[in-house]
Amino acid sequence: MTHNNYADFDVPQDLKFKTHDLIRLGNFNCSAKLQAESFAGVLQAPNQITKAAVELSFSVTPKDIIVTGTISGQREIECARCLKHVTQPFSERFAETYSTKLEIIDIMYVVRQTLALTEDIRFLCSATCKGLCPQCGHDLNDGPCGCKPENLSPFAVLKGKFK
């Protein structure tokens, strides 16, 4: 199965392709830069996609169109410990099979699903992030704050009650 590269193929920004155009072109590869606004709401706020590009590979059979691809770019995330916003690269692969009987193939739906399903529950700016002081809110990555450590034991209030 040979694949042609169509660098000049006009990839729609919404990634909705007309099936008859894909069948006419046959097996081919293409890529496009996508608008970051297309991914608003995919990640939980305040995290967001800031840059995105997609590489697509189409394989056409008599009954199906098989699409494999990679969505890559950058996302701005908020660290769950220190609340700093950091930029992080991402790259995710996806694959989907569509019937040639469909009029339109919506690849953006699969791309958005892929990004939503790969979002971490908690983003960290680094594995060694020390977070914020629970008393004064100072970023402990910048050094100690000077607060005395608080006894966080749930039994601390009972200390000295049973003498």
Image (tube, rainbow, N blue to C red):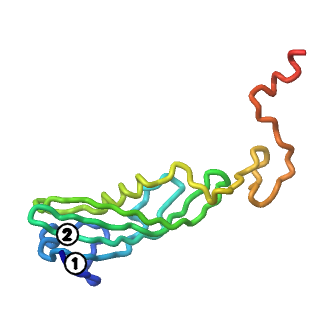
Q: Which residue is mark 2?
A: 59
Which quadrant would residue 23 be assigned to in this image?
bottom left
Looking at the image, residue 147 lies above or below residue 4 = above
Q: Give 60 or 84, whichever is nearer the viewer.
A: 60
Which quadrant would residue 24 be assigned to in this image?
bottom left
Name the residue located 77 percent from the left edge and 35 percent from the top edge. 152
Q: How would you rate the neighbour count of disc 1 (Cα within 10 Å): few for under 14, some for 14-19, many for 20 or more?
A: few
Name the residue located 36 percent from the left edge and 67 percent from the top edge. 70
Q: Residue furthest top?
A: 163
Q: Are marks 2 and 1 in contact (CB under 8 Å)?
A: yes
The three-letter code of the residue at mark 1 reads His
In the picture, measured across the screen, residue 128 lies left or right of residue 78, that is right
The disc, 2 or 1, on the residue closer to the chain's N-terminal end is 1
Name the residue located 27 percent from the left edge and 75 percent from the top edge. 11
Q: Residue furthest right?
A: 163
Q: Which mark is residue 104?
A: none
Task: Residue 41 in the image: state x and y as whole percent.
Answer: 43, 55
Q: Give 74 or 29, whichever is nearer the viewer.
A: 29
Considering the numbered disc 2 on the image, is that residue within a helix, a strand or a loop? strand
The three-letter code of the residue at mark 2 reads Ser
Name the residue located 81 percent from the left edge and 25 percent from the top edge. 157
Q: Which mark is residue 3?
A: 1
Cα separation, mark 2 vs mark 1, equals 8 Å
Considering the numbered disc 1 on the image, is that residue within a helix, a strand or a loop? loop
Task: Residue 60 in the image: state x and y as whole percent.
Answer: 16, 69
